[in-house]
Each structure stands twice: as C-alpha cells, then as structure tokens.
C-alpha cells in the first residue's frame, strides 16, 4: 500500500520498532540484505501478530489502513539500520520513501467468499475476498505520478494520477502560471510507473450453485502482479470500492465492486475449507471396519444398480495416490484417471455427476462444451481485458487438485486434445498465443465417459478403435471400463426392480409419505458431507509400500510380462505398474493407514485385472496386449495390416492400375483372415495415407 508523505505519525515510532524486533528479528536481517534504495521495498506483517501486539492498532487497520500503514512504515524506518556498501564504501541508510508495509492474514470476520457479502456494507471497507482465479489480464504499466513539461517555459509540473484510466494534466504551469500547452514526458525521472494487472475471482466449482455465480475483479500493482494465475485459490486483501460500469467508453448508472489489491494470501492446503473435525469420529468408525471400501462403494450412486467395480475404482480415484518428487528431479503424479466407455443409457453420466457431488473439489463438464476456454484454458480477447488478451481458465484448471468429471470425452475439440494430454501426464497446461506464455496448474483427476464411435459398443472390436480419441490420451487412463447394454433376464429383472423401488421412494417424498424404511434403496451408506470430509482427511496421509506389497506388485508385473509366448504381444508396461501403485496407495488411504499392505496391493491388482479383461485382451487372439491401450492397436492388428500392405505391394507390380480390391481380399482370406478384417485393414491403411486409390477399388502403396 502506498504511503502518503503528508500524513502525521499517530503512533510512537520507537514502540512500533520494538514490535518488529519482537516478532520479526530473523526476517529483518533478510529484508536488510535485499534492500534497494532505488526500488519499493515491501515488508510483510501478519495481522495476527499485529493483533497480539496491539489489538486496538490491528482493528484500526481495518478502518483506517492508510494511517496504520503510515505508522508501520515509520516504525520500520526508525530502526537504527546502516551498513557499508562493500563495492563503493558508502554508508547506506534506510530511506523512508523506499519502504512499504503490507499486512497479510486478515482475521476471519474480515474475509468473505466471493458474493457472500452485502454490497453496501462492504463498499469502502478493507477486506479479504476469497475465491478462485478465473481470468487474468496481461501485465501492463500504469502511471501513478506524471511529469508534464510546459511548452512555453520548459518547467516541469508533477501531477499525481487518480484511480481512473484517464491521464490527469496540470491546470496551470507552476512556474509561468499559464494554462499550457503541456507535453507529457513518460521517461522523465519524476514520472512514476508501476506494473498493473486485473484478475477475476469466482467461487470455486464445489461452492458455486450455477456456472454464472457472482464474480469480483481485483486490481493488482507492483510486485503483486503475476502472483496468481488462473486456477489458483487465494484471498486478495484490499480496499473494496464500487466503480462505475461502462458500456464501451460510455459510463452507466450501474456500480460494480472492485478490490484494490494490497496483499495476497495463497490457499495452498488441499481441501482447507472442508470441515473434518466434526465428522472425525464417524470417519474413524468407517475406516476401522473389516472392509471399509464396501461401505464406500454402497455410498456411490446408490440409485444406480450394479457397476460395483466401476464404483470401487471411482472411490480409489477420489482418495487418490501419493504425489512424489524424487531426488533426481523426477515427478510422479498421484492422480489417477478413469475412462468409462459404453452404450447410451447405461448410467455413465449419472456416475460422473455423483462423483462430482462427493468429491471435495470437482467440476462437471462436457467434452463438447462451448466456453472459450474449453477444457484446458485459452488466451482470449474480451471486455475484461479492455480489448486486450486475457488468460481464461478451463475446466481442468478450475478443478486443480480436485476431480474433473468430463462427459462425452470423445467429443473434444482438436484444440483441447493436446492440452488434455499435457494435463493428464504433466499436471499443467501451457498457453502460448499473442505473446502470452503461461503455464496453468492442473493437478487434476479426470473421470471421463465416452460413447462408442458407432453409437453402440461392439465387444468384438478393441475399445481403442471404437472411440474418437487419440491413442496417446487413451493410454494415460489408469483404468478403462466398458459398459454394454446386453440383454440378461436375471440382471434386467434386478435393475428394473431396483429402479421401480427408487421411483416409489421419490413418489412417497412428493406425497409426504416418506419413512426411514422407504429410504434404504436410495440412501447412501455414508452421507455426502461425511464422505467429503473422509476424503479430505485421508488425503493428508502419505502411505508407504511394505515389503509384502512391493513383492505382490512385482510378482504381478513379472507374471503378466511372461504370460504370452516369446513372439506374442507384450501384455503390460511399466506405466501400468505405476497405476497399480497409485491404486494401492488409495486403498491404504481408505483404511487411514500409513502402510500399504499386501491386501491393498491385491485389491489394486484385482481392479486392474478387471480393466485388462475389458480393454487389454486382443479379441482375435484372447491374449493380453498392452499395445491396445498404449497405441490403440493390437499386435495381431499390426501384423494383419502389415500383411495386407505387402499383398497390395506385390499385386501393384502386376496390375497397371494397382491392386484390385477383390484380389487383395481373397489373398487375405487365404491367410486365414475374415473378409471384414481384411477390409478394415484396407480402410486403416487409406486413413493413415499408407495406400491410395489411383482408380476406384484399386490400391497402390504410397512409398
């Protein structure tokens, strides 16, 4: 906060210097080492420490921050500091006009969530506004004090600038007393400029009732610029003032609140806004059960019958694995990603919405959403940036350190593909456009649902071939489940019976005839607020692998790698082993254990094997094949495609117009392949440009 030099000292400077020596002895030394008399040197003071020192002075700060900050700067300057510059030998003393004090860590009663205040009550007050950064403009310079040269006499007149965007000129020359004309001198020593930036705060997604909930803008200056980036959660402290809204360049009668940022308190802790203590006894009771994961599974979308394996996987996903930073600089993510592929009407969207409801931080969105930022983030030109470029956060950034439930994942725009890939693997998103180079945080867990390419899932074709998804992104999912709508009389009867019971509960609620007994079929075993607290509490633990768990996971990896013949497909990769470790870590967190047991490893292996049976088995050979997930194509498919290409290459030498379609199919069938498989291989070769048609249904290789 800038300090006006004409303010009188209200408090005793010597008493305030004692405050600094009492609470900030070590910080004073570091501040002294970094002191530069030619720049603005900011010293941060905690409100809580100031309150302990003098509660009246601390409370005065909320009412008269300029006056109190002036006193604090005076107290800082009154400390007897002087030292010798080793290079010049000059004695350096603190210059009061080069000092500033910033008060952070405002009390709870002065901190508000975005929109959680009365406009009249907060207007003009000193407060902290808590929220998530949704947008950020480019960094610009703003003039605080302008020097003007009188064209008639050459004298300089210094004019402090007001808070609006217009440049205030002098009324008359201080030397010749004429009313100009004046020439603004932007590079004069007396012209003071500071960095300037606007950010937009919004409620985080788990607190927002709708996508259009209230926002508030904050103006940042000096060293606060670039301190926050879209996706960050923070409290911006400053004076809250109402400003005129403009329609283009025309002011309107509407007022909008704006924060003049004075300090920023970053909210770094995971789920720091979740009330855990009041649910702790219930959490420990659940965790102490012989099999707590079953209770959790029963609490995920109880109105949807079945899908226990998927619900168990979602539970592990919400509890998460341990993020690791290794001594060699390598980073291992703790987030795990899940994809559900299947027929329409099977409840995929309902599972995603329920997971969003249970997760302490979560966003539900669609792969074909229409926002400018998309799933990742974007640099856009809009009114917020006064026509300039603005960094806008997408869903994966908004769900930083939380869950992004993405429906219709296969409908992503091409621009989102690379960003989603980076977020899932590197946990960040890079934006480079119009001179903006920014990296946004995205330590986000992805729970996605996708529909098959042809509308219905075909259990005889590899999953990777049935969705419009880049194999590189597909391979980043730790678990992939398939859901098919296949008739089964017994199962269908159970589903229909369950759905009618759930509907009956809803009908009784509508008629005020609801009873506790009626609720059994649709009531979760764990209340959503308890589940959120459970997850938040468990994620504070960083369980460690025991020897038994290490041996169990190692044996599984080796067994899978040696499951096929020497010339068969590779059944698993090291990346899948990392997925097993994350699942085992999550299982230990469910038990609130700091040790990953053999049982945790066994559970991880079981759920992973379930997915391998869905996705990792080549339908042509019945063998596990890691390439299906890693590259989108099995070894048998690659072998067949290579053979068909060779057949076309041999035939084109004999046929002037290229290899005839029927001849290629017949030779493929002679090698033991079905006609449909041969034609799929031909289509695949055409799509990737390996062959072309010089004449209809005649092929030549492109090489």
Image (cartoon, grey):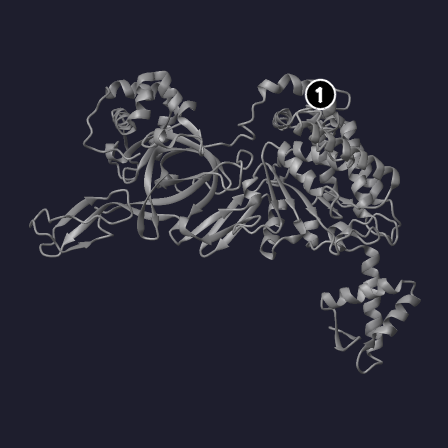
* 100 displayed left or right of 393: left
- Determine whether 564 is above or below 111 in the image: below
| Residue 129 percent across, percent down from the top left | 42, 32
Question: How many numbered marks does the figure carry?
Answer: 1
- Position of 584 with respect to 399 (left or right) is right
**Residue found at the far bottom of this picture:** 656
Judging by the rendered image, the residue that carries numbered circle 1 is 516
Asked which quadrant contains residue 697, the reply is bottom right
Depth order, front residue of 343/470: 343
Q: Is mark 1 on a helix, strand or loop?
A: loop
Residue in the image at 36% along x and 33% along y: 238
Q: Give the farthest residue toward the front.
A: 511
Report the quarter where the C terminus lies: bottom right
Residue 447 is left or right of residue 237, and the answer is right
Q: Is residue 310 visible?
A: yes
Q: Where is residue 503 in the image (x, y as percent from the top left)?
A: 73, 33
Q: Dot 1 surroundings within 10 Å: few (below 14), some, or many (20 or more)?
A: few
Residue 656 position by quadrant: bottom right
Residue 683 horizontal/vertical position (percent): 77, 66
Name the one closer to the observer, 355 or 632. Answer: 355
Q: Quadrant of the N terminus?
A: top left
Q: Residue 242, how many percent across, how many down?
A: 33, 37
Q: In this view, does 67 lie above or below 471?
A: above
- Point 62% across, 34% down: residue: 357
Give above or below for 178 relative to 27.
Answer: below
Report if residue 551 is visible in the image. no
């Amino acid at each position: 906060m800038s300090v006006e030099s004409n303010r009188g000292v209200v408090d005793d400077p010597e008493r305030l210097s004692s405050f600094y020596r009492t609470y900030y002895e070590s910080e004073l030394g570091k501040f002294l080492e970094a002191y530069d008399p030619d720049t603005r040197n900011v010293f941060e003071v905690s409100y809580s420490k100031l309150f302990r020192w003098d509660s009246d002075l601390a409370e005065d700060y909320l009412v008269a921050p300029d006056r109190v900050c002036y006193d604090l700067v005076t107290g800082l300057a009154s400390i007897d500091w002087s030292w010798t510059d080793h290079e010049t030998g000059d004695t350096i003393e603190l210059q009061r006009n080069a000092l500033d004090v910033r008060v952070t860590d405002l009390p709870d009663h002065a901190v508000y969530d975005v929109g959680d205040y009365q406009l009249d009550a907060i207007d003009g007050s000193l407060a902290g506004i808590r929220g998530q950064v949704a947008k950020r403009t480019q960094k610009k310079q703003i003039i605080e004090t302008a020097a003007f040269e009188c064209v008639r006499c050459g004298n300089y007149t210094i004019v402090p600038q007001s808070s609006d965007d217009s440049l205030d000129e002098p009324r008359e020359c201080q030397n010749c007393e004429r009313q100009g004309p004046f020439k603004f001198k932007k590079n004069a020593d007396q012209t003071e400029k500071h960095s300037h930036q606007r950010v937009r705060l919004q409620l985080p997604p788990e607190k927002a009732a709708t996508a259009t909930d209230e926002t508030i803008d904050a103006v940042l200056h000096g060293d606060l610029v670039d301190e926050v980036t879209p996706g960050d959660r923070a409290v911006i402290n400053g004076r809250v003032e109402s400003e005129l809204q403009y329609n283009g360049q025309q002011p309107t009668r509407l007022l909008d609140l704006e924060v003049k940022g004075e300090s920023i308190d970053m909210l770094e802790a995971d789920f720091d806004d979740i009330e855990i203590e009041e649910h702790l006894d219930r959490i420990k009771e659940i965790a102490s059960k012989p099999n707590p994961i079953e209770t959790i599974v029963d609490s995920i979308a109880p109105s949807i019958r079945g899908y226990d394996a998927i619900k168990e996987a979602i539970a592990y996903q919400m509890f998460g694995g341990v993020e690791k930073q290794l001594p060699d600089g390598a980073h291992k993510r703790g987030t795990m990603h899940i994809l559900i592929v299947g027929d329409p009407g099977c409840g995929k969207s309902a599972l995603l919405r329920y997971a969003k409801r249970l997760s302490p931080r979560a966003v539900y969105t669609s792969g074909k959403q229409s926002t400018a930022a998309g799933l990742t983030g974007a640099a856009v030109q809009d009114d917020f940036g006064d026509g300039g470029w603005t960094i806008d956060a997408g869903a994966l950034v908004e769900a930083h350190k939380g869950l992004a439930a993405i429906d219709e994942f296969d409908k992503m725009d091409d621009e989102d593909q690379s960003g989603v890939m980076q977020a899932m693997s590197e946990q960040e998103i890079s934006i480079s456009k119009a001179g903006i180079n920014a990296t946004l945080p995205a330590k986000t867990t992805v729970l996605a649902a996708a529909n098959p390419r042809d509308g219905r899932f075909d259990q005889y074709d590899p999953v990777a071939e049935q969705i419009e998804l880049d194999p590189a992104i597909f391979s980043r999912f730790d678990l992939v489940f398939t859901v098919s709508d296949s008739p089964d009389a017994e199962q269908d009867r159970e589903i229909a019976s369950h759905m009618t019971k759930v509907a009956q509960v809803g009908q009784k609620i509508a008629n005020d005839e609801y009873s506790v007994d009626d609720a059994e079929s649709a009531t979760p075993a764990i209340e959503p607020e308890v589940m959120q607290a459970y997850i938040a509490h468990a994620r504070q633990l960083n369980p460690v692998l025991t020897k038994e768990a290490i041996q169990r996971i190692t044996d599984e990896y080796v067994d899978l790698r040696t499951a096929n013949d020497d010339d068969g497909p590779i059944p698993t990769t090291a990346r899948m082993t990392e997925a097993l470790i994350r699942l085992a870590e999550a299982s230990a967190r469910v038990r609130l254990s700091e040790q990953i047991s053999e049982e945790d490893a066994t559970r991880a292996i079981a759920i992973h094997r379930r997915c391998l049976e869905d996705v990792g088995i080549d339908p042509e050979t019945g063998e596990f094949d890691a390439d299906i997930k890693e590259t989108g194509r099995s070894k048998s498919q690659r072998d067949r495609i290579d053979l068909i290409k060779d057949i076309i290459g041999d035939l084109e030498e004999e046929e002037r117009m290229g290899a005839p379609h029927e001849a290629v199919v017949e030779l493929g069938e002679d090698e033991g392949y079905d006609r449909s498989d041969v034609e799929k291989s031909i289509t695949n070769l055409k799509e990737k440009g390996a062959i072309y048609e010089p004449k209809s249904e005649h092929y030549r290789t492109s090489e």
